Image (cartoon, grey):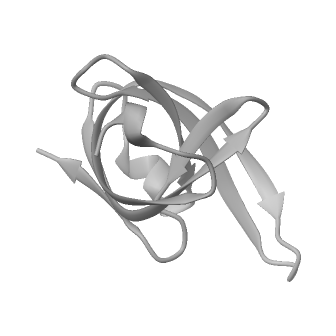
């Protein structure tokens, strides 16, 4: 899958991206009251198309700028006019070596 194939409110089967930048880590409180961390990153596919990735909790420490990552069974949402990709609760984010 490539960035040009992504559509809001859809699933991501598998997409490979290179992290170009990593934003600040923020804390959040969920509706159920649990506390976690979230971080937004920018990434590009092999065609140079850019997309935002949302990292959650332990994913934040595993990912660095210039890392190549694969997201499987994730989701796509549109937030403030930009597409966001995330592995979410049921998907998988893998950092490639």
Q: Is residue 13 above or below residue 52?
A: below
Q: Is residue 36 above or below residue 64?
A: below
Asked where in the image residue 31 lies, by quadrant, the reply is bottom right
Side (left or right) of 12 relative to 69: right
User: In front here: 82 or 5?
Assistant: 5
Side (left or right) of 70 relative to 38: left
User: In front here: 28 or 19?
Assistant: 19
Please give the name of the residue rendered at 45% of the width and 56% of the height, measured from the top-left corner.
59
Residue extending furthest bottom?
Answer: 32
User: In front here: 83 or 97?
Assistant: 83
Q: Is residue 64 above or below residue 9?
A: above
Image location (x, y in percent) of residue 6: 46, 43
Image location (x, y in percent) of residue 26: 73, 44
Image location (x, y in percent) of residue 64: 36, 34
Residue extending furthest top?
Answer: 48
Q: Is residue 46 above or below residue 27?
A: above
Please give the name of the residue rendered at 30% of the width and 36% of the height, measured from the top-left corner.
17
């Amino acid at each position: 899958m490539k960035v040009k194939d992504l559509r809001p409110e859809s699933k991501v089967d598998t997409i490979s991206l290179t992290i170009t930048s990593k934003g600040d880590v923020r804390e959040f409180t969920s509706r159920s009251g649990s506390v976690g961390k979230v971080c937004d990153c920018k990434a590009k596919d092999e065609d140079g198309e850019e997309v935002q990735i949302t990292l959650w909790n332990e994913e934040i420490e595993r990912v660095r700028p210039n890392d190549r990552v694969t997201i499987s069974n994730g989701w796509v949402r549109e937030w403030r006019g930009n597409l966001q990709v995330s592995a979410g609760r049921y998907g998988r984010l893998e950092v490639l070596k």
